[in-house]
Image: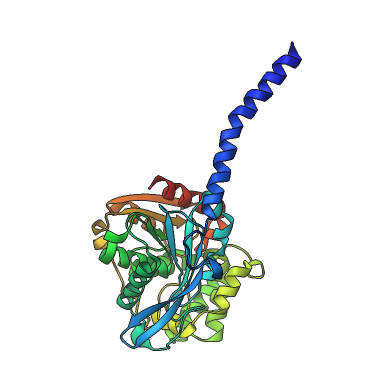
Amino acid sequence: MLKRFLLASACLLAACQSPTSTSDESSRADYFDQTGREDAWTGGARLIPIETPLGTFNVWTKRVGNNPSIKLLLLHGGPGATHEYFESADSYFPGAGIEYYYYDQLGSGNSDNPQDTTLWTIDRFVEEVEQVRIALGLDATNFVLMGHSWGGILAMEYALKYQENLKGLIISNMVASAPEYNAYAQNVLGPQLPSEVLEEIKALEEKGAYTSERYLGLITEHYYPAHVLRRPLDAWPEPVNRSFAKLNYPLYLYMQGPSEFGIVGNATLRNWDRTADLPDIHVPTLAIGAEFDTMDPQAMKYIAEHVGTGTYLFCPGGGHMAMYDAADTYYPGIIDFLQKL
């Protein structure tokens, strides 16, 4: 009798599992289907010509996967970093069937670098993203824009001008106000540093020695492992080190300033503030904050509460690069948001 029961149970279990297995196999096949894809022979990589006031330049993109209803364009930070630090996505997005695009902004990574400050403006970068969208054939039925750090600024600005083209928006580890970011760094995170370190940092800032080896060394040693990526510096992920090694420092210095300890010096982003405009963003929006981020997680929650349709994802234990030090919260939260669109 027991043998018969076990045999029947096994048959029932196999019957229940069979359709799911077939469905999973079909889904995987669809994800890797390259039919009609002109970029298949290059592994999804392509150069896109971008028209600028100084002429035509090329930016680099790479598609991974195939999903007609979810196409995620990744905007890296910096400004002047590269797509490479997003590579942790390869451990999460393919299994969820998400089509996503790596993209180096003009002046970064594999893209052209005209080295002209007249191109280093928010408005010009917004127009670049729009040209990339058109070239990739993304539209409101499938286009989700995800920006991290500076990329979050760019994503907000794009949404405020072109949200009719969006299906969804993800703002990762970025607040809506540069002055608020600075205040949090100086008034909340700064005092958490060893007192002698903070005293020396402030003395160097008063001298305007933002680019000095000593200033950058203090920030890198004491601030970055606590708030940028919560690992010892010698244990930082290889994709992050590879990306940061290629940083377009003149671009970064021009727009962000010399460190992640606020936007300092004469950086052009220092007065950027879109707090009052958040209600004008109506597309479904996910805002992501982390416990130990360089920016106030409550200010990122504020974004979710003040856009038209917002969701907040909090990453306990995470820093500014929460895609690494809080990956098991970060990516499932993003995937859940995308699958509910």
| 231 in relation to 12, above or below | below
Q: Please report the residue visible at 59 percent of the width from the left and 74 percent of the height from the top.
A: 242
> In the figure, is residue 278 to the left or right of 133?
left
Split into 4 quadrants, where in the image is the N terminus? top right
Q: Position of residue 229 (x, y in %)?
A: 56, 64
Q: Position of residue 98 (x, y in %)?
A: 48, 54
Q: Residue furthest front?
A: 36
> In the figure, is residue 30 to the left or right of 299?
right
Instruction: Count the marks.
Output: 0
Depth check, front residue: 85 or 94: 94
| 5 in relation to 201, above or below | above
Q: Residue furthest top?
A: 1
| 286 in relation to 243, above or below | above
Q: Please report the residue visible at 37 percent of the width from the left and 84 percent of the height from the top.
A: 56
Depth check, front residue: 334 or 177: 334
Q: How is the image coloured?
A: rainbow
Q: Is residue 3 visible?
A: yes
Q: Position of residue 155 (x, y in %)?
A: 36, 65
Q: Please report the residue visible at 49 percent of the width from the left and 56 percent of the height from the top.
A: 66
Q: Position of residue 319 (x, y in %)?
A: 52, 61
Q: Please report the residue visible at 56 percent of the width from the left and 85 percent of the height from the top.
A: 213
Q: Is residue 183 visible?
A: no
